[in-house]
Image (tube, helix red, strand yellow):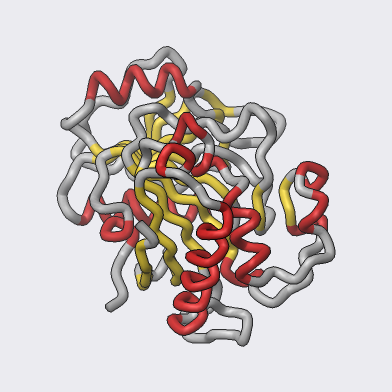
Amino acid sequence: MERCLWDMVGKARVVTFIGAGGKTTCLSRLTEEISQAEKPVIATTTTKVYPLAFSSLWQNADGFSPPKTGMPCFWYANLEAESGKWMGIPVDILDQAIQKEFGKSFWVIEGDGARERQLKCWASYEPQIPHLTESAVLVIDGRLWGKKLQAREIHRPELYPHLIGEIWRPELAWQYILTSPMFYSEYQKISWSVLFNRWGDPGRRSSQDLGNDELRGLIKVGEEFLGREHLSDSHRPQHLRIASGNAKEGNLQWYDLW
């Protein structure tokens, strides 16, 4: 059965997206799904994004969360003149606002930037995930399967030079996932999902798309790969879900590793 983003994140109250290949699309889509369920929802970023089409906007850099309007709201600090992007809210200020509003609103957050690349590598100060995040999603461009990775497709390729020139297959994907923030000690209490976002024309699938059979194969390789790594419970996130599909269209499928 195919389900939507809000199902995938377990209807969590605070959701943060990181990675590349459709984070902003996921943010907009999840915000829409929550709003359609008639729940109050605030979207924001801890980095910066190009202006989005939201019914309600709230510009405030001082930590005062948006007033209740009955519409999904995007909160940003200010407009960056050079890039034309909305500057996000520092993670410490955002945590304070979430704490104050906890239980009253749902929050959807973009927690890092990738400059429209297909794969994200993280600098030491990235990502910026609020501590009160309940569910986090690592987004990966689902069109990479079977392709030889090029530096131009990767954000900060100099940090993961071993990826360049390699074929994006399950083994390489798991090597990448294992070095991602979901395995950082500070984020292991979060429920994590990896979403291979198969975006583009929803009516077409190429041979590189990750369909149901390929997803099962990825899970099998992941179980073997993680078994070889002998990861203890203290060195892995409390929950890991592997998902694939078109987030914008709301047709996702997934399997839970634990």
Looking at the image, how many numbered discs can be counted on the residues? 0
Of 171 and 21, the residue lying toward us: 171
From the image, which quarter does the C terminus lie in? bottom left
Could you tell whether 183 is left or right of 252 in the image? right
Q: Residue at x 36, y 36 (%)?
A: 189
Picture quadrant where residue 256 is located: bottom left
Could you tell whether 56 is left or right of 147 in the image? left
Residue 148 rendering spot, x and y as whole percentages: 78, 70
Residue 109 rendering spot, x and y as whole percentages: 42, 39
Eyeballing the image, is 7 above or below 251?
Answer: above
Residue 190 rendering spot, x and y as whole percentages: 37, 39
Q: Residue at x 61, y 70 (%)?
A: 170
Residue 56 seen in this snapshot: no
Could you tell whether 221 is left or right of 243 in the image? right
Eyeballing the image, is 71 above or below 228?
Answer: above
Could you tell whether 54 is left or right of 184 in the image? left
Residue 238 rendering spot, x and y as whole percentages: 36, 44
Eyeballing the image, is 4 above or below 40?
Answer: below
From the image, which quarter does the N terminus lie in? bottom left
Q: Residue at x 31, y 65 (%)?
A: 4
Of 98 and 134, the residue lying toward us: 134
Picture quadrant where residue 121 is located: top right
